[in-house]
Structure formats: C-alpha cells, structure tokens
Image (tube, helix red, strand yellow):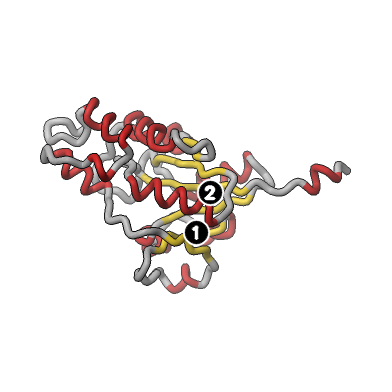
C-alpha cells in the first residue's frame, strides 16, 4: 500500500451552478466567500444547459459560458465546467454531481447555493440523494433568516456569510434592455462583453 497516497488530503471542491444570465458581482462574492470560508481547493462554476425550473428562454450557452470565464479569470482556483452545457436534456444537479463523484473519487464536494435555492431545494430532482453526495453550503446575508422545507432542514449544512449585495441577473437584464447603466452590477469584463454583443437589448433576445 502506498502510505504517502493514503495520507494525502482529499481535494475539497465547491460546485456552483446557475443560469448565470448574466453572472454578476454577487455571484463572484459568494464564490469567493465559499472558497475561503469552506477552505476549498477549487470552485467549479457550472452554467445550466436546459434550466428546467426557468420559465424564460436563457441566453445562448456560449454567451453565458464566455461571461463566466471573464468573471472568474482573476482567481486561478475558479474553473468553468461546461458539463451541463454539453449534456442534452434538463440540467439536473443530481446528474451533474453523480458524474463528478464518479469521475473524481475521493474528492469532497460542497454544493454552494443561495437562499432562494435553499428555500426551493425540496422541489429539485432527487434532492435527498443529492444531499447524501455533497456538503450543502448556503449563503447567508446579515439579518436574513434561512428557511427551507422541514425535510430539507433536517439535513446538516454549512453557512457561508455574505456581505449585503442587492444584485440580481434580472436587474442587469432590465437595465440593459432599457439602455440604463449596469456596469457596477457585473465585473468590468462582463459589462464590456454585454455591450459588445448587444445582449439583453429589447430587439436582441439571443
């Protein structure tokens, strides 16, 4: 037996998924907080392919992936993962996690989610199995109470403290569509990308 290999610490990787349409400053703040507070070796950013719980049509996958890549370029421990973009069918987090666990045995996985996702976690496909495969890490802003379905609350989770950042992808899209400034809400390179490609303008819904 290779005792050196046996003694090697497990890699600790965070899974951070979402539509990222577009990625914004609060996304980056949450990933950075999780990276440090959970002592992760890496955070995998996983843009959704077919977001089954979204009623609207998402922007093209290549645009969303490109914006994430620009937003995370400053941090070498942030990695873009295209697995859901390249997989057909609905983007179920459970399918993604199963594939990651199978591909990288011995890794400790943390699933990083926001308060709204925590509140709706009981509606996710196979959520109970999912929580058996990962450590749940939930964002918590000062003064906010964490709420979830009682069945979900029975599962332990970690808390990732966050600063107060009132930013949403919806607001960015609305501002862009109205011709208003949104530069402060997204990383500078993402703002330039949105402007260059004319994303979210009323006449361009790509």
Q: Percent position (x, y) of residue 123?
A: 39, 60
Task: Specify the farthest residue to the right.
Answer: 1
In percent of the image, x 58 and y 55: which residue is there? Answer: 133
In the picture, measured across the screen, residue 51 lies left or right of residue 179, that is right
In the picture, measured across the screen, residue 106 lies left or right of residue 113, that is right
In percent of the image, x 80 and y 42: which residue is there? Answer: 5
Q: Is residue 173 visible?
A: yes
| Quadrant in which the C terminus appears | top left
Q: Which mark is residue 137?
A: 1
Height in image: 188 above or below 126?
Answer: above
Q: Tell me which numbered mark, 2 or 1, is placed earlier along the sequence.
A: 2
Quick one: SS at disc 2?
A: strand
Q: Determine whether label 2 and label 1 are within 8 Å by CB.
A: yes
Q: Percent position (x, y) of residue 4?
A: 83, 43
Q: Percent position (x, y) of residue 184?
A: 25, 43
In percent of the image, x 50 and y 50: which residue is there? Answer: 94
Height in image: 149 above or below 104?
Answer: below
Q: CA distance from mark 2 to mark 1?
A: 9 Å
Q: Which residue is mark 2?
A: 14
Number of disc labels: 2
| Quadrant in which the N terminus appears | top right
């Amino acid at each position: 037996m290779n005792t050196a290999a046996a003694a090697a610490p497990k890699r600790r990787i965070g899974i951070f998924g979402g539509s990222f349409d577009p990625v914004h400053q609060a996304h980056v703040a949450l990933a950075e907080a999780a990276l440090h507070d959970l002592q992760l070796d890496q955070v995998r950013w996983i843009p959704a392919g077919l977001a089954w719980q979204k009623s609207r049509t998402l922007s093209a996958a290549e645009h969303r992936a490109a914006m994430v890549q620009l937003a995370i370029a400053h941090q070498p421990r942030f990695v873009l993962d295209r697995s859901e973009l390249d997989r057909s069918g609905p983007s179920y987090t459970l399918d993604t996690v199963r594939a990651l666990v199978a591909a990288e045995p011995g890794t400790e996985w943390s699933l990083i989610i926001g308060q709204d996702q925590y509140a709706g976690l009981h509606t996710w496909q196979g959520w109970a199995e999912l929580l058996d495969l990962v450590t749940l890490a939930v964002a918590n802003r000062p003064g906010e109470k964490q709420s979830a379905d009682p069945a979900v609350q029975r599962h332990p989770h970690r808390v990732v403290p966050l600063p107060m950042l009132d930013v949403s992808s919806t607001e960015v899209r609305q501002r862009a569509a109205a011709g208003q400034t949104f530069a402060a809400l997204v990383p500078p390179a993402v703002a330039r990308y949105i402007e260059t490609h004319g994303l979210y303008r009323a006449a361009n819904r790509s």
